[in-house]
Amino acid sequence: MTGPSAPADGTAAEPAVRTRGLTKRFRSGQVAVDGIDLEVPHGAIYGFLGPNGSGKTTTLRMVLGLVSPTSGTTTLLGETMPGAGPRVLPHVGALVEGPAFHPYLSGRANLDRLDAADATADPRSRDLRAAAALERVGLGAAARKPYRQYSLGMKQRLGLAAALLRPRDLLVLDEPTNGLDPQGTREVRHLLRELADAGTTVLVSSHLLGEIEQVCTHVGVMSRGRLLVQGPPEQLATDGESTVAVTTTAPCLDGATQLLADLGLTGVRRDGRTLTARLGMVAPEKISAAMVGAGLDLVGLEVRRPRLETLFVELTGEGFDVAR
């Protein structure tokens, strides 16, 4: 399958997904998405995070041309949507707001119907495509089972199989692990890595922060319709507030406490023989050198970077729950 893709040298002029000022205002006056500039690089696994009602699903629907924006623009694979939809969307697989299939047809029959509706698909290889997609998501043994008898997790798997019927340049997945057990979640994580390694760009909405941290190369955090931050997870964590923990055998911690304050560290706290403080712009090696220079025995020094979950709470002021 040929279609829009990144240049062979990896220097794409356009991200796989780009929005500029993308906004959705409902008739009630509610602003669901407020002028966001989303950028999903080619080949990335982009984790789209946000609490309930943050605007993630509405954003995905606008990106795919399923909902018209109030204002703003979207490009998919370098082409402007929704005008380029008929040309671009055959190269895009999507699972948004849960799968919908015919309840009395089997999983295999549902995929066959979807494949037959694709005018760009070669009917001669339909059987091979459907069988391969079902095996890839672990539904080979349930291919002939009626969809109405599928569990929630199996329905999610079938939705993924539908998105994978043909090779895609871009996958847009809304909560793809919803209803899956831990093993199924791990399998989806491995599948996303395999797809990205093969050159597919993945934009995935999820509430499972642990999964996002393990698999995603980029993340974006939504809250109240606005995109608060985006970029590689390690870069975003570095941008957060780091702390340092200093452990000493000095009989009195007053000297070490004052030394940290003199170096410019703030929020110094004591916990047994360990002092913790906000690191700020102070280099950790400067702390160790100052401790040794002052004759204070240094047993340990640990820099604690904020995790993605900590950053999320700092940005949104909310805990992270099962959200869309």
Image (cartoon, rainbow, N blue to C red):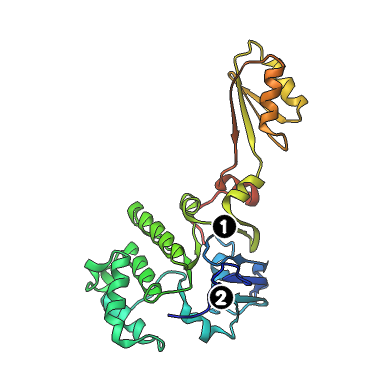
Quadrant of residue 49 in the image? bottom right
Tell me, yes or no, if residue 19 can be seen here: yes
Q: Which label was assigned to residue 77?
A: 2
Q: Is label 2 or label 1 in front?
A: 2
SS at circle 2:
loop
| Disc 1 packing (10 Å; few <14; some 14–19; many ≥20) | many
Tell me, yes or no, if residue 103 can be seen here: no
Q: Amino acid at mark 1?
A: Val
Q: Position of residue 300 (x, y in %)?
A: 57, 24
The residue drawn where x is 47% and y is 55% is 215
Q: Amino acid at mark 2?
A: Leu
Q: Position of residue 258 (x, y in %)?
A: 74, 20
Which residue is outermost to the bottom?
119
Q: Position of residue 152 (x, y in %)?
A: 34, 64
Residue 271, relative to residue 214: is it above or below? above
| Disc 2 packing (10 Å; few <14; some 14–19; many ≥20) | many
Q: Earlier in the sequence, mark 2 or mark 1?
A: 2
Residue 5, relative to residue 315: is it above or below? below
Residue 160, relative to residue 282: is it above or below? below
| Front position in the image: 52 or 62 | 62
| Front position in the image: 75 or 145 | 75
Q: Which label was assigned to residue 219?
A: 1
Quadrant of residue 121 in the image? bottom left
Q: CA distance from mark 2 to mark 1?
A: 19 Å
The residue drawn where x is 73% and y is 30% is 265
